[in-house]
Structures are given as structure tokens and as C-alpha cells.
Amino acid sequence: MKLSLIFLAFCAILPAQMPAPPMAPPPASGSAPAAPPADPNAVVITIGDHKITAAQFFDLVKALPAQYQDTARGAGKRDFARNLVELQVLADQAVKLGLDQQPDTKLQLEFQKDNMLAQAMFLNLQQNATISDAEIQAYYDAHKADYESLTARHILIRVKGAPMPAAPGKPELSDDEAKAKAEAIRKRIVGGEDFAKIAKEESDDTSSGEKGGDLGEFKKGMMVPPFETAAFALKPGDISEPVQTPFGYHIIQVQTHTSKTLAEVKPEILAKLKPTAARQAVADLTDKTKFDLNDAFFGPAPPAAAPVPSPAPPAK
């Protein structure tokens, strides 16, 4: 079956009619085995002279928005097939009436064709983009903080006026009082008392305090700056001096400090660099193509950005 552009375009609006996927019950013990996969060349839908094979059906499913694909492969497979039948019936009827020859329809069909081809070309450029080892290394070196993380725990002594509410029954402490209390707590921990026990008793961050002060794993950019700076400067096991933030004073203990290696994050870096390389390839192709935009219709082109001057070499 020749799959027309209108066929694919209509698929995007049909899933709204499809039922939501039901909650699947857990498989019963001794249940029948799953049906074997269909022969990809088997004709599974016939619409007049048109035929759709199993392979074509699943290719059409792939053209759906991601949130509908599982339903169209499973509980909603027959409903989707019925939608395809209705779509082809309407498309055939439109051709019989000559609607495909109307100027606006022809323009939209041509646009849809170009749009699909452009998407296919962009994916081709992205998949085949060559990223050098030097580019990968440079990205890694510039973004090492993105691949660095800590696990830590803390005890917070809240100051009066902090953006978080005070715990019921606890006095409001001035800045000096909160700092003095935090210093006293640090001495207790350094002296051998259990960090987690003190956190449960004293921390004004009740959510982490219930877990012995545990904050879990976090990266740079996830905590307020003074806390982050102090935490990432600590060695695992060290107990910080009181660290002031808008919330009060924190006693921090880093438990682990890990940095992913280049080898570990290389696939992630490639996934970020390849689309950028593809966009640059699009820009290069466009620059090599002669085109003209009517300034009277679109307005004048914005001025080109001034090139960034290279730094002068150091004086000898």
C-alpha cells in the first residue's frame, strides 16, 4: 500500500479518539504464552485496493506521538487499525472529488512532504555527525561540574526570619544565638557524639532531620550557593564549620564525593553534541544556498553579530 502524506498527517489527530490503556493485571502463573510475532509481510488490513502489512502497521505506529505508541501496539491496536481504515476511506473519497487538486490542499501536501524530508535529513545529519575526541574532551573539561556529585547530611539551626517556618515549640533564635548553637553542636559531633542522633533531635530541617540529616545525592546547582561551596570543598567524613545561608547555620558532613569519568559520560556528551553539529550543518548548507527574502515584505534583516576578537598574545 502506498502511504500518502495525508495518511500520516491524519494519524496525528486520530489518537485522541483512542481509549486510555487499561491497567494490566499481573500475569497469572501458568498463563498461556504470548502469541508469536506476526509475519512482517502478512497483510493485516485491506481497504478496497489498499493493503497494509504488519511491518507497515508498526511503522505507522512509530509515526504516532510517543505517549500513544504502547496503546496502539497493545490494547488499542484494533481501534488504531479502524482509525487507519477511516483515514484511507476519507483520503480516497477526497481524491475522487478532486480535493487533492485544490490549490490550498496541494500547497499543504507539498509542505508536509518537505517537512517530513527535512526531518529525515536532520536526523541523518545528527546520526552521521562526526564528533572528534578532542571536542568530547573539551566539552567534558568545560562541564566537569555536571558530572560531579555528593552524598551528604546536615544539621540546620534556623535563624529568626528564615524563609522556612519555625518548628512548633522551638524558640526563634537571633543570628548570634543560632551561630552559637551550631558551633556547640559541631563540638559535640567532633567530640564523638552521633551525627544522625543529634540531627534527629536538633535539626530545624525536619524532613532531613528525621533521616539523620541525610540529604541524599546532589550536584552543583541544586543547593543554595554558600551551602554548595562549603559542601564541595569538604573531604568525605569531614565536619564543616557552621555555614551561613538564608535559612540559618548548617553543620555539613560529606559522605561520598564522586566524579564520573570521561568514558562513563561519553555517550551522554555525544547525545548533546550531535544535535549541535547537525544544526551547524544545516546552517552551513543554508549559507551555501542562494536564497532571497523580500525586505519589503519581511522587514530588513537584523545586523550580523560582530565577531569576537581573539585575545592578544602575551607580551614577551
Image (spheres, rainbow, N blue to C red):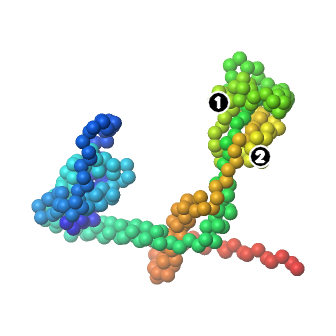
In this rendering, would 75 be left or right of 115? left
Q: What residue type is labelled 1?
A: Lys
Name the foreground residue: 205 vs 23.
23
Label 2 vs label 1: CA separation?
22 Å
The residue that appears at 72% across and 26% down in the rendered structure is: 197
Q: Which mark is residue 15?
A: none
Name the foreground residue: 24 vs 293.
24
Q: Residues within 10 Å of mark 1 (few under 14, many from 20)?
A: some
Q: Residues within 10 Å of mark 2 (few under 14, many from 20)?
A: some
Q: Where is residue 308 in the image (x, y as percent from the top left)?
A: 69, 73
The residue that appears at 31% across and 42% down in the rendered structure is: 21
Residue 154 shows up from this direction: yes
Q: Where is residue 67 in the image (x, y as percent from the top left)?
A: 37, 49
Q: Position of residue 298 (x, y in %)?
A: 47, 70
The residue that appears at 27% across and 65% down in the rendered structure is: 5
The residue to which callout 1 is attached is 211
Residue 225 shows up from this direction: no
Name the foreground residue: 282 vs 261.
261
The residue to which callout 2 is attached is 235
Q: Quadrant of the C terminus?
A: bottom right
- SS state under label 2: loop
Residue 316 versus residue 13 in the image, above or below: below
Q: In which quarter of the image is the N terminus?
A: bottom left
Q: Position of residue 225 (x, y in %)?
A: 73, 45
In this rendering, would 79 be left or right of 27? left
The residue that appears at 69% across and 25% down in the rendered structure is: 200
- SS state under label 1: loop
Q: Which amino acid does label 2 sit on?
A: Lys
Picture quadrant of residue 194: top right
- Which residue reaches farthest top? 169
